[in-house]
Each structure stands twice: as structure tokens, then as C-alpha cells.
Image (cartoon, rainbow, N blue to C red):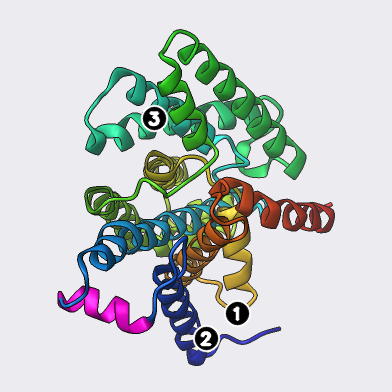
Amino acid sequence: MIVHRSWHWIAAGLVLSLLAIVGVLFGTVRLRPGDVASAFTGSAAASTREIVLTLRAPRVLLAALVGAALGASGATLQATLRNVLAEPYLLGVSGGAAVGAVAGLVLRIPVALTPVAAFVGASVAVMLALGIAHGTRSASHADVRTMLMAGVVVGAFANAVIMIVLANVPLDTIRGALWWMMGSVGDASWRNVSWLAVYVAIGLIYLYWYGPEIDVLTLGEESAAALGVDVERTTRRIFLASALLAAASVAAAGLVGFVGLIVPHIVRSAGVSRLRPLLLGTAIVGAALVIGADLISRVALRPTELPLGAITAVLGVPFFLLQLRRAQ
């Protein structure tokens, strides 16, 4: 058994910092570290400042926030459901959020309110998935196959709704929506970073506050109730907070799958078990993972940019199959 050490935090922080720096340096136009430093001090050329301050810095920060949100959401869902395969994308939560976000895009609601529409869709998806699981047995005791099938059904339904919503909209809107659904932080701006940071902070603080109760839930419903936890109310609150994190990330970057599955396993493999340090660890590792995936999407076939969701899927599908085999 691996014992968690303090140097793990230092290593994770260094990897995140290094990837953030590389993410700013590399792209269609390569920059030198001195160029980046000059851009932040205001002494660089106008074109360099535009690349660093308007394009790449907000993109890296947006990717970091998306990764932190998805990692924390996945860790919380896995702990609450006591299921190592639980994560927003596989349980249909991201699909429900996508329905809300696409509806907001078509209705042209303010950008800062898009996460609210996505949150409504994600909340409905949570209730649908749990309702399907309740069809056989209690959701908290449903086996891996039941939860996965529930997520597949909800995700398929969400895709059908999105196609219906996009059936009679202009072609430009359809193209933008389809690219966004494949996952991308290419449209990052300081405005997007600002509102996403607010939503992510609210979700993380809320989950951190209820961390001890979530730890008790991992013991099982009967044990948690015996220890004084209102299981139904706490579970509902945790699901909604996890849905908020997933919805905000979907509203900002589209569908980026498997991050919430991979990241909690990486952090737990370092010996972290309790939710509060797990949230911190998944936020750091999730941020690093999405920054790295976005960097690959930009430079792999330069100057063509690959969808961010495709990169995370290439990493996540083999990992998912391995975990599914272990779970069985």
C-alpha cells in the first residue's frame, strides 16, 4: 500500500506549473521564455502580448479550471456512489449539461448564465440516471453494469435532444455547437475564465465543507445513518454540487470526457483516501491533465487543432476498460 507523502504535493504542483508554462510557450507560433516574461511586464511587441495575454494565458487557465472541476466532480461521485467507474461523462451528467448549454446557445442567453442552463440539464440527468438505477435496486448499491447502462441511456437521450434542438438553426450555429460538443478551450477569454472560476470555487468550497460527511457515506448507507448522517439529503446535495462542477466545465469547454474517471484514480494511487485532500489532489492533477491534453491537441497536427475531447477519450477509453475489467 502506497503511503501519501508531502512531497507528492510538491511534485504535483511542479508538474502543473511546468505544463502551464509550456502551454503558453508552444502553439502555432513558438515563443521563448523571455518573450512571455516581456509580455507580462509590458515590454514585448504588440503581437507577442496579444498571443500571450489574449490567446494562450486565458486558454491555459480555462483548461486548468475545467480539469479541476471535472477531477473534483469525478472524485466526489466515486466516493458517494462507492463506484470506481462513476464520473460525469459516463453517468450522463455531462450529456445533460450539454443539452442545457446548447439550448442556451440557441436561445442566445448571456454567456455568464450558460452554466446555469447547463446545471439544470445536468441536474435532470442526475435524477434520470439514479431513477433508472432505482428500477433494479437502490442506486447506492447498484452494480457497475447498472450504473453504466443508466449513464448510456441518459447520454443517448441527451444526444437525441441536442439533435432536435439543432434541427432548425443556422448552419454556422450548428458548426459551432458541434465543435464545442467535441471539447475545446480555443475560445478562452478572460471573461470566460472569470465566471468559470466563480462557479468552480463555489462547487469546490461546498464539497470541501461536506467532506467529512462524504467520507462517512463511503462506509455505506446504514453505517452513515447510524453515525447521524441524513443520507438522502446529503447524497442529493453532493450530487447537485458535483453536477454544478460538471455543468460549468461543459458550458466553458464542451464535452471533455474521462477526466473525472482518470484523475481520482491517479490521486488515490498516491495514498490519498479522505475527500478533502482528495479534492485538492484531483483539482491539481485534473488541471495538469487537461492543460497537457490541450497542448497535445494544438501541436500534434500543427497548424490543425484537434478536439480536446478526442485527446482525453484516447487516454480515457483504455483506462476505463482496464478499470471495468478490475471491477468485474
Would you call the spot at circle 2 few (<14 residues within 10 Å), some (14-19), or many (20 or more)?
Answer: some
Observer-nearest residue: 135 or 129?
Answer: 129
In this rendering, the answer to whether 279 lies above or below 188 is below
Q: Does residue 13 lie above or below 86 as drawn?
A: below
Q: Which residue is mark 3?
A: 101
The residue tagged 2 is 8
In which image quadrant can residue 88 be found? top right
Magenta stretch mostly in which secondary structure? helix
Query: At 61% across and 43% down in the image, what residue appears?
Result: 140
Q: Is residue 294 left or right of residue 200?
A: right
The amino acid beneath tag 1 is: Gly
Residue 55 visible in the picture: yes
Name the quarter where the N terminus is drawn.
bottom right
- Is residue 223 visible to us here? no
Name which residue type carries label 3: Ala
Q: Which residues are magenta?
A: 33-42
Which is in the foreground here, disc 3 or disc 2? 3
- Disc nearer the start of the sequence (3/1): 3
In this rendering, position of residue 171 left or right of residue 315: left
Q: Judge depth for marks 3 and 1 and give the one in front.
A: 3
Magenta stretch holds residue 218: no
Determine whether 50 is above or below 136 in the image: below
Q: Which residue is mark 1?
A: 271
What is the spatial separation of the Cα atoms under label 3 and label 2, in whole angstroms?
37 Å
**What residue appears at the point 70 percent right and 53 percent down from the top-left corner?**
314
**Label 3 Cα crowd, 10 Å radius (few <14 / some 14-19 / many 20+):** many
* Secondary structure of the residue carrying numbered label 1: loop
Residue 4, x across and y down, in percent: 56, 85
